[in-house]
Image (cartoon, rainbow, N blue to C red):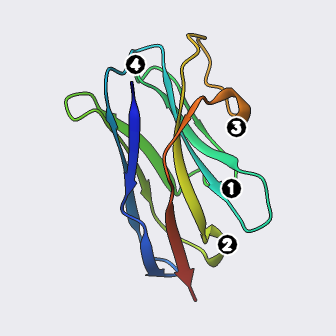
Amino acid sequence: QVQLVESGGGLVQAGGSLRLSCAASGRIYATYTLGWFRQYPGKERECVAAIKWSGLSTYYADSVKGRFTISRDNAENTVYRQMNSLKPEDTAVYYCAVDFHSNIVVRTRKNEYGLWGRGTQVTVYS
């Protein structure tokens, strides 16, 4: 059974950087997708980045392109998200999640992801 644990959130000044980690216990197959979602208070979770565990395909929301980078370390069973040039509007709870479906393309809807971490808070102040 796969479990996910996020870490790396915190408080950062606008323009700064953070790196979030999502450590997965259990076997992760190349066909899985690991995604990072964020949730604003009272809003639905939205996918901001995702990566096939094979590394062959990635997705970035327009709002984070050029600022966020998703990567994975197979040996550590961990997905990272480097966030640069952070803005106050990036303040949210960030979740990592796994899409177990073996489709080729990266999927981005939250109901397509079957396993979630508990989330980590990122707060960006100006």
Which of the 4 quarters of the picture holds residue 43? bottom right
Q: Nearer the viewer, mark 3 or mark 1?
A: 3
**Viewer-nearest of labels 2 and 1?**
2
Determine contact: label 3, label 1, CB under 8 Å.
no
Q: Which residue reaches farthest left? A: 75
What residue is pinned by disc 3? 110
Circle 2/circle 1 CB separation < 8 Å: yes
For badge 3, the amino acid type reads Lys
The CA distance from mark 2 to mark 3 is 20 Å
Are circles 3 and 4 on residues that touch, CB within 8 Å? Answer: no
Which residue is farthest bottom? 126
Residue 119 image point, x, y percent: 51, 56
Q: Residue beneath label 1, please?
A: 63
Q: Quadrant of residue 2?
A: top left
Quick one: label 2 or label 3, which is nearer the N terminus?
2
Which residue occupies the foreground of this view, 62 or 43?
A: 43
Mark 2 crowdedness (10 Å alpha carbons): few <14, some 14-19, many ≥20? few
Mark drawn on residue 54: 4
Q: Quadrant of the N terminus?
A: top left
Secondary structure under tag 2 reads helix
Label 1: which secondary element: loop
Q: CA distance from mark 3 to mark 1?
A: 17 Å
